[in-house]
Amino acid sequence: MRRRDFVLGALGTGALPYVLPQGAVAQTGRTTIPYGAAIRIDPMLEEPDYRKAVLDYCQVVVGEGGLKWIDLRPDRDSFVFDQPDRLLAFAEEHGLEMRGHTLAWYAAMPDWVETIASAEEARTELVRHIETVVGRYKGRISSWDVVNEPIADHPTREAPIRDSVWQRHLGKDYIELALRTTAKVNPDARLVINDFDFEQPTDKARARRKAFLDLIRELKARDVPLHAIGLQGHLQGEIAIDKSGLTAFVAELASMDLAIMVTELDIIDNLLPGPEIERDGIIAQRAKDFLDAIGAAKRPEAVLTWGISDRHTWVPIWFSRDDGMPNRPLPLDADFRPKPLMQVIQDFCAE
Ligand code: XIL
């Protein structure tokens, strides 16, 4: 059986896997759509190959952690800015843009927030957090994931919004509060709502697309400041991209005068074939289908991957492989060598 037939069998979708064109070498340097990645500041400062890869490929960086409540707010009265300060210093030293992730999220929250006992207290804490954090980096962090993952996993008409300490005390108005507060503190910041699982040909993804569009229409109808939508892009490698569904979704968002960012692209490969060449080919093809479907409606203003090398990725935490082989979700392998995925991203960004 020819390798290509094997892969087609594995794909079963008729989409040809992406194979690096003969002689194609991933070019480093400037591209038209800025490319960037989520960074782990400590390993990056300690590992020269990691640092070199970031400087070779990235124009934008975001902290994989550091600006989440769990990192910033060990207790109600303190703010710990060590990690984001160091990442920002690195970014500014090398002329890279830094994104802020994230101000209002359900996850990565310190235990003490569960002691918040009223709507008034929740409002006070959310506003104080945003004023302090956004205020500190005013003029230095240009775009913020103000609200992360607001849509429930399986949204219904009655319950479209994901449960969180903010939702519980303030209802979905926490979203408007977070956006208006961020805009007041830093009127020049690009305000982003970031979410995931919109790209699959499934009832779940269709319901999430609908719930998300309903939320955005409401915010726009009330003139709530919002500039862009972050499509995370944690793609399930074994599931085809619903290209027409995704293109239509992005077109709806664009029609509401919103920019689009790809904010956390990686391809979850725990259910993909073992052999690396086949797996890398499928991974690159999924990303190409995802990016092309978005680009068919609106060119994203940035493309970020959630990490840059398989050496530092969250995927094994949640999606390790039964065959024990390492996951390969990112554009560079564990030795920072480019894979077909990097070529796909660079071709898309350079178009
Ligand atoms: C993940 C980090 O990568 C992990 O290290 C951490 O344990 C959990 O959070 N969506 C997001 C990111 O918006 O912040 C998450 O990052 C991955 C899913």
Image (cartoon, rainbow, N blue to C red):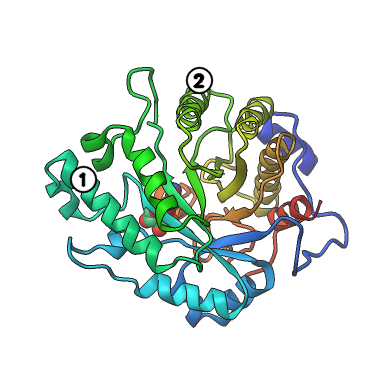
Judged left or right of residue 284, residue 133 is left
Among the 4 quarters of the image, the one containing residue 83: bottom left
Judged left or right of residue 120, residue 4 is right
Among the 4 quarters of the image, the one containing residue 238: top right
Which residue is at the front of the view, 123 or 290?
123
Location of residue 56 with respect to 3 vertically, above or below: below
Location of residue 140 with respect to 207 vertically, above or below: below
Among the 4 quarters of the image, the one containing residue 224: top left
- As shown in the figure, which amino acid type bears the numbered disc 2? Asp
Which residue is at the front of the view, 265 or 302?
302
Residue furthest top in the image: 157
| Badge 1 density bin: few <14, some 14–19, many ≥20, Cα 10 Å | many
Q: Name the residue under label 2.
A: 203
Q: Which mark is residue 122?
A: 1
- As shown in the figure, which amino acid type bears the numbered disc 1? Ala
The percent coordinates of residue 217 (x first, y second) are: 50, 27
Report if residue 311 is visible in the image.
yes
